[in-house]
């Protein structure tokens, strides 16, 4: 047999084993249903003809094929009759027609239709070809097991012929067809056990005629899919048995399931047809008791599956899910009728379907597997950019080499002249798999944690304990966690306001257009980082303080992990050898202490802390722009855009840096390679990356502009003012809160910068180091521009935040230091140079941690003492109109006032209150000024009308101001713990709704667009579905 | 692939420069080398230029001056003899009648009224046995001056506005010298006053004087000899924590074998580092300087005397050490008498920490109390009957200035005027005409002044104070949450 697709050629003869084989008696009719089966039919018919036990009758049913299939059938000698069922005939009807025809033929040839009629039906599809022994083995099994009414063969994949498809099937509670096999499992006889199953595929199914008639054949409602499951379930429910016979082998192409054939009965949407069939099968066969639960579960499950499908960018299938659900649920009468028909089926024994159904935990197991696969695919997205670029270049080299000698010569010249550079090293070796990169970067996914490469053979604990690098990294993480102990639990202080009561407070802050905060309420939008915090707090069971703690405490480990990932890929881009793990560990540790050493943590600058943790991930995502594959570049654009949006949310000027960088890169790209930049996939992702934050943060940006509070666009997260870096701070990674020149520790921050300068001396990686310097320069130039901007916030005038510049410069310095060290040999003679670099970086990291553990306590504490008596704060919780007017200052230098509402100024509200403060000469200010300046009962009433219940002058109160308030009618003196704090209650019930304001449909629309855009971007930056195994 | 510029996405990829540079590196500067020099230099230069200014707070906004709506002056209760209340008005300020009444006067009682002419003094108003409250509203409010002088003995004091805080120094609580404090609440709501009594070694633990409540419109008398019986020199700091209350002190001293004399002790609004005590009384007698330090750190106080030529440091006077929160007293009997003979008329104190001070002079069987007086450009005071002179003094650290002293009679007619030039640390005496009932001092700079009245053997020293002509409205603005 020359044809390799011939199954029997591979199988050989089946050994004759077991007890005395008895072939079941009775005539066997084959019903072969065909639709456009020209591709497979010749093989199928050959297989049919080659059966060792030939069937008595072969009836082919054609359902309106438009190819040569009917001719093939008619011409083949093995086929006794061809029924033309016409187009649009479903499989059940076709089988019914075939059985009818077989009966006619049997009656014609065998005399009396009763005794000599067909006793066995063997169903075949036009894309399933039986092994020569298939029917023989099925009949032998039927003969040895007279109780079996349905016998299914072992199905193997066609055309691979080796992989198992099914050995009987069952169905899970969610309507998933369960085979119990791994995907693509090779048949090595591992499942060869004859056993009872819920159902067997109709391809190759041998059915006892009596059972067929009793069960009523296949359900007409299931034209293509799930008919077999339904038949088997009915059989099991009526006490019949379905047995799988592994000795019988049928090869199945699953043409309908895979969509390689578009049958009209299956409709255009395969997924829809499948889901509809499964839902129908579940609903009509389920026990009556479980039916309500099933109805609910399938509906909810459909929604969950839709979300999942949307997340992997399969909107068509998601719609199919919904359509299938609607198609089944909108005709409850049909389901009831079908259930009634099933109840009326004759029973021959106990209902055995329960034990044959899939276990209840199975769907959850599948869900977990899928999530794991998705996470793995998502984390792998950019990590192997370097490899793919080398593969691409290798392929190009190969292509050129093939085109001619001249090109080959040029290529080899290039390789020899620049053999030290990364890409030519790859092209000269011609492969990326054998290089040291594969050895160094063993942990592709990065999820194993750093430093565990190359020790896969041992347990994780042993691997950790035996790897000094992993131990060192673990020590840095632990020390970082201890150094951030101030943030365990409730934390506030410095620029960090206390967390609100729960995630709900953040949600309403984000969703509402009008905030009942400050003197008279404001329409200044919530700062943009409130949304991610709200999401995080929601995940953490609604605890806002847990969200803040998580962000602050995990900043160091997350920065370390991100820096490790980024430096590993960056190093492999600069040098195919990549960086040794100890160098990566030193570099990422030196970066990861930045939240502490920069002063961001101690000052409570949440924005800067988040930026430090986020930046390496952002840079890692941006490396995806270098991917040779356009689709991956596009996704890198979305990913970078999403992370950039998060970074911009906490430190808005980061966007300016990103825009300048993108403009520069595009400009250089267009100058150097106008042809290469013509492709949209070259420049599109970059534009996507900078445009995404603008869309995702639209409610905030537009809101600020509408509220005439555009200063907020240049403020970092937190309560202003924050400290400002000087020149030395900029170069040593300090945000300015620390007295850089006076503390003996400041030189620790200068170490990476010094190494970055030295890194320029190394010729081999100079280009990469220069790139880092260029990045730093851009950040500094943007900072130069921003630093000149002064923002008038009323009580204080601050410069635009330069935190992004500080963090970017520090990150670029560490990267340049690591890349510069790559030029030094990692092992062998001269290795000490790289070791010295790593050691210096490690000194920076360890010294920074030591400083943070000993000196750097900072301003963080458990709570902010706002000196308001407790009974007032509890009263103000009763409603926003019960505000507390807090007045500080004295007569000579002027008085400042704020109105504290609800639970005080919580995280996210500080900026709203600062930017939404009333104009100094506005009505609200004049009202308050009238009360404090020339108090009279009218002024008291006017202030009460602003929604103020108490007036407080915290210690030290100016007695002259206090005396004036003491004297006025309408103010009742109130007590305070501190005698020098003066307090009064306004003797009138606060007016409900005093601080209410108008809603805004613009804000609503923008928030809806934002949330939708967030979903879309999340979906777009996820891995493509084909990458999820 | 060897041409790096064909790469559509890398842009200025690291490899690009390096690759192109490699073959030529030995001959000339490659772009990578140029960049390797230019970029760090440019970065450093940018970092150098990038010095964003630190956050700046909005500048302090001083209070606005507005027309005074109301002025209340609290006069102490008289001692055992009649002491009518004199109400005057600084020239060119307000017009109209003001009410003079005892704080606890019945609601329906018709309050006495006084209508001082501009720059003059109204007829004395008798408020028997009670403190008196002088209250002017609207047009009658600005520029009010009031004082209470005894008719027989030479004692008197200026009536003051109720202040949130006041400091009384040199009080006694013993048999020789004892002080009675009067707390007067002129308002319609209760007032709560915290008193802190300072002794030689620090604040005394006196439980009954914290949180003293003065009911609305009433006065409360505190006898220090009963509360803290002690022979030590004391000081009291007064903090009004609720409402408004004026505090006055009446000192009774009975030297062994001598007759009792009374004198009111004026309060100081705030402690200071540079104090001027204008008005020294010449002649033989006992003089005792009491310095109180309400702060948390001990301090040393240097003493000088002001003479017409400038400040002079007496050779045999040593600095006074005052403990934190404590009171120190030093006997200057001989030194002051000698200095006054040589033309000194003021005492100048310089301290590292803010202090308060009173000089108690017992000369010719009469007590005169000279307290530290705040220096101001415009001051005024009423003049008691007798042989009066004005003492003007300039702190040693101030710039030279000249001041115009104008004396007016009860009708407000100018009866004398003199321009006085003052060097730093100088103290100049100016005699007033006999008809003078009120005096005003206008200077270029801050000048401290006092009226010294001698009548028979008695002497009275009355500090000049700036008349209140305007209301102060604080600048109010939104603050940071």
Image (spheres, coloured by chain):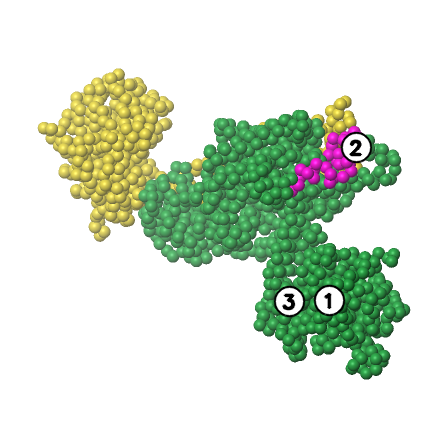
Chain colours: A green, B yellow
Q: Residue at x 73, y 42 (%)?
A: A388
Q: Earlier in the sequence, mark 2 or mark 3?
A: 3
C-beta proximity under 8 Å, tags 1 and 2: no
Q: Secondary structure at mark 2?
A: helix
What mark, if any, has residue B282 been given in the picture?
none
Highlighted range, magenta: A416-443
* Chain of the residue under label 3: A
From the image, state whether disc 2 or disc 3 is nearer to you: 3
Q: Position of residue A833 (x, y in %)?
A: 64, 26
Q: Earlier in the sequence, mark 1 or mark 2?
A: 1
- Per the image, the residue denoted by label 2 is A415
In front here: B137 or A14? A14
Q: Secondary structure at mark 3?
A: helix
From the image, state whether disc 3 or disc 1 is nearer to you: 1
* Chain of the residue under label 1: A
Q: Earlier in the sequence, mark 3 or mark 1?
A: 1
Q: Quadrant of residue A889?
A: top left
Q: Residue at x 65, y 34 (%)?
A: A580
In front here: B386 or B239? B239
Which residue, as the protein is rendered here, is positioned at the far top?
B315
3D distance between C-alphas at marks 2 and 3: 64 Å
Which residue, as the protein is rendered here, is positioned at the far left?
B257
């Amino acid at each position: 047999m020359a044809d390799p697709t011939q199954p029997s050629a591979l199988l050989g003869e089946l050994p004759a084993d077991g007890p005395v084989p008895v072939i079941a008696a009775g005539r066997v009719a084959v019903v072969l249903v065909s639709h456009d089966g020209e591709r497979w039919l010749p093989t199928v018919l050959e297989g049919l003809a080659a059966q060792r036990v030939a069937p008595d009758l072969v009836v082919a049913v054609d359902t309106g094929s438009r190819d040569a299939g009917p001719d093939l059938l008619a011409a083949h000698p093995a086929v006794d009759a061809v029924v033309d069922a016409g187009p649009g005939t479903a499989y059940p009807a076709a089988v019914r027609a075939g059985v009818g025809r077989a009966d006619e033929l049997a009656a014609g040839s065998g005399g009396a239709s009763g005794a000599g009629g067909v006793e066995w039906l063997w169903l075949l599809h036009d894309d399933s070809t039986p092994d020569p022994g298939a029917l023989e083995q099925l009949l032998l099994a039927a003969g040895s097991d007279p109780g079996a009414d349905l016998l299914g063969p072992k199905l193997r994949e066609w055309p691979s012929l080796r992989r198992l498809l099914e050995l009987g099937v069952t169905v899970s509670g969610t309507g998933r067809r369960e085979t119990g096999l791994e995907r693509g499992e090779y048949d090595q006889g591992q499942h060869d056990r004859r056993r009872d199953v819920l159902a067997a595929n109709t391809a190759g199914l041998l059915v006892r005629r009596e059972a067929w008639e009793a069960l009523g054949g296949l359900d007409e409602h299931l034209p293509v899919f799930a008919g077999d499951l339904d038949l088997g379930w009915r059989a099991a429910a009526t006490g019949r048995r379905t047995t799988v016979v592994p000795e019988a082998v049928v090869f199945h192409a699953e043409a309908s399931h895979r969509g390689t054939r578009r049958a009209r009965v299956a409709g255009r949407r395969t997924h829809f047809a499948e889901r509809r069939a499964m839902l129908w099968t579940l609903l009509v066969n389920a026990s009556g008791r479980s039916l309500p639960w099933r109805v609910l579960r399938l509906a909810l499950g459909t929604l969950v599956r839709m979300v999942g499908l949307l997340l992997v960018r399969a909107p068509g299938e998601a719609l199919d899910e919904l359509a299938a659900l609607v198609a089944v649920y909108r005709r409850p009468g049909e389901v009831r009728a079908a259930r009634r028909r099933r109840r009326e089926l004759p029973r021959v024994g106990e209902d055995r379907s329960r034990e044959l159904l899939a276990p209840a935990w199975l769907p959850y197991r599948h869900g977990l597997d899928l999530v794991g696969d998705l996470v793995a695919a998502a984390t792998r997205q950019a990590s192997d950019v370097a490899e793919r670029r080398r593969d691409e270049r290798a392929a190009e080299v190969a292509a050129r080499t093939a085109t001619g000698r001249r090109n080959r010569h040029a290529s080899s010249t290039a390789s020899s002249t620049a053999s030290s550079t990364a890409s030519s090293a790859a092209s000269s070796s011609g492969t990326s798999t054998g290089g040291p990169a594969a050895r160094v970067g063993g942990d592709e996914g990065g999820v194993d944690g750093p430093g565990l490469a190359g020790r896969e053979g041992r347990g994780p604990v042993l691997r950790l304990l035996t790897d000094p690098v992993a131990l060192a990294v673990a020590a840095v993480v632990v020390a970082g966690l201890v150094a951030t102990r101030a943030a365990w639990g409730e934390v506030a202080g410095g620029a960090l306001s206390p967390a609100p009561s729960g995630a709900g407070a953040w949600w309403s802050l984000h969703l509402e257009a009008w905030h009942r905060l400050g003197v008279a309420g404001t329409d200044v939008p919530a700062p943009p980082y409130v949304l991610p915090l709200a999401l995080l707090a929601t995940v953490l069971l609604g605890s806002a303080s847990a969200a803040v703690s998580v962000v602050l405490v995990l900043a160091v480990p997350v920065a370390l992990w991100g820096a490790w990932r980024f430096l590993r890929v960056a190093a492999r881009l600069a040098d195919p050898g990549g960086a040794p793990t100890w160098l990566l560990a030193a570099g990422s540790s030196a970066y990861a202490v930045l939240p502490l050493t920069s002063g961001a943590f101690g000052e409570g600058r949440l924005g800067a802390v988040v930026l430090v943790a986020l930046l390496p991930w952002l840079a890692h995502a941006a490396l995806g722009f270098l991917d040779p594959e356009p689709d991956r570049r596009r996704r890198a654009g979305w990913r970078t855009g999403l992370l950039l949006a998060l970074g911009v949310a906490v430190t808005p000027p980061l966007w300016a840096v990103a825009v300048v960088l993108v403009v520069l890169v595009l400009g250089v790209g267009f100058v150097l390679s106008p042809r290469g930049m013509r492709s949209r996939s070259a420049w599109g992702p970059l534009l996507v990356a900078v445009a995404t934050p603008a869309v995702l943060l639209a409610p905030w940006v537009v809101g600020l502009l509408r509220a005439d509070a555009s200063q907020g666009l240049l403020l970092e997260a937190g309560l202003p003012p924050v400290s400002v870096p000087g020149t030395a701070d900029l170069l040593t990674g300090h945000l300015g809160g620390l007295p850089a020149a006076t503390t003996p520790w400041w030189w620790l921050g200068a170490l990476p910068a010094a190494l970055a300068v030295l890194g320029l001396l190394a010729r081999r990686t100079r280009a990469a180091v220069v790139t880092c310097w260029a990045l730093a320069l851009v950040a500094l130039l943007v900072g130069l521009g921003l630093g000149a901007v002064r923002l008038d916030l009323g009580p204080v005038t601050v410069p635009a935040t330069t935190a992004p510049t500080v963090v970017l410069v520090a990150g670029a310095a560490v990267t340049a230091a690591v890349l510069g060290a790559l030029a030094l040999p990692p092992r062998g003679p001269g290795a000490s140079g790289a070791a010295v670099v790593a050691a210096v970086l490690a000194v920076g990291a360890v010294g920074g941690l030591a400083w943070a553990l000993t000196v750097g306590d900072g301003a963080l504490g458990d709570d902010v003492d706002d000196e308001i008596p407790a009974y007032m704060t509890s009263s103000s919780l009763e409603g926003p109109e019960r505000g507390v007017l807090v007045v500080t200052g004295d007569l000579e230098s002027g008085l400042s006032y704020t109105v504290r509402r609800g639970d005080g100024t919580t995280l996210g509200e500080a900026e709203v209150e600062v930017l939404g403060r009333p104009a100094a000469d506005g009505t609200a200010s004049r009202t308050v000024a009238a009360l404090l300046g020339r108090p009279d009962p009218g002024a008291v009433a006017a202030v009460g009308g602003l929604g103020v219940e108490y007036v407080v002058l915290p210690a030290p109160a100016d007695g002259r101001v206090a005396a004036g308030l003491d004297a006025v009618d309408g103010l009742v003196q109130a007590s305070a713990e501190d005698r020098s704090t003066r307090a009064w209650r306004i003797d009138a019930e606060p007016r409900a709704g005093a601080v209410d304001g108008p809603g805004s449909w613009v804000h609503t629309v923008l928030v809806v667009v934002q949330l939708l855009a967030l979903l879309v971007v999340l979906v777009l930056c996820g891995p493509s579905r084909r990458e999820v195994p | 692939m060897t041409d790096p510029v064909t790469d559509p996405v890398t842009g200025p990829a690291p490899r690009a420069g390096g690759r192109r540079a490699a073959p030529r590196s030995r001959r000339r500067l490659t772009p990578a080398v140029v960049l390797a020099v230019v970029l760090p230099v440019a970065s450093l230069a940018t970092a150098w230029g990038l010095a964003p200014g630190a956050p700046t707070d909005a500048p302090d906004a001083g209070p606005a001056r507005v027309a005074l709506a109301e002025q209340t002056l609290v006069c102490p209760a008289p001692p055992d003899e009649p002491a009518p209340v004199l109400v005057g008005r600084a020239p060119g300020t307000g017009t109209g009648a003001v009410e003079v009444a005892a704080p606890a006067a019945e609601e329906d009682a018709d309050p006495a009224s006084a209508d001082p002419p501009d720059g003059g003094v109204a007829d004395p108003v008798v408020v028997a046995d009670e403190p008196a409250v002088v209250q002017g509203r609207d047009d009658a409010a600005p520029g009010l001056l009031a004082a209470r002088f005894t008719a027989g003995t030479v004692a008197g004091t200026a009536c003051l506005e109720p202040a949130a805080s006041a400091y009384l120094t040199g009080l006694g609580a013993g048999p020789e010298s004892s002080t009675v404090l009067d707390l007067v609440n002129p308002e319609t709501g209760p007032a709560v006053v915290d008193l802190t009594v300072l002794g030689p070694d620090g604040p005394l633990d006196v439980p009954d004087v914290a949180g003293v409540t003065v009911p609305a419109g009433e006065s409360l008398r505190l006898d220090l000899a009963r509360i803290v019986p002690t022979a030590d020199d004391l000081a009291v700091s007064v903090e009004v924590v609720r409402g408004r209350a004026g505090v006055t002190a009446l000192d009774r001293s009975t030297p062994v074998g001598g007759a009792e004399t009374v004198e009111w002790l004026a309060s100081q609004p705030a402690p200071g580092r540079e104090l001027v005590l204008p008005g020294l009384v010449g002649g033989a007698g006992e003089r005792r300087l009491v310095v109180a330090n309400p702060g948390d750190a001990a301090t040393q106080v240097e003493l000088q005397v002001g003479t017409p030529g400038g400040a002079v440091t007496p050779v045999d006077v040593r600095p006074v050490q005052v403990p934190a929160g404590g009171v120190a007293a030093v006997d200057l009997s001989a030194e002051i008498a000698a200095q006054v003979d040589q033309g000194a008329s003021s005492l100048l104190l310089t301290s590292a920490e803010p202090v308060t001070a009173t000089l108690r002079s017992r000369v010719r069987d009469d007590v005169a109390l000279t307290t530290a007086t705040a220096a101001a450009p415009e001051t005024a005071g009423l003049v008691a009957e007798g042989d009066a002179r004005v003492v003007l003094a300039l702190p040693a650290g101030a710039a030279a200035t000249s001041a115009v002293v104008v004396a007016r009679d009860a009708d407000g007619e100018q009866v004398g005027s003199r321009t006085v030039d003052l060097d730093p640390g100088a103290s100049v005496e100016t005699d007033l005409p006999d008809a003078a009932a009120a005096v005003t001092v206008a200077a270029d700079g801050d000048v401290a002044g006092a009226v010294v009245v001698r009548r028979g053997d008695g002497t009275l020293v009355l500090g000049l104070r700036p008349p209140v002509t305007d209301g102060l409205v604080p600048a109010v603005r939104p603050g940071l949450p």
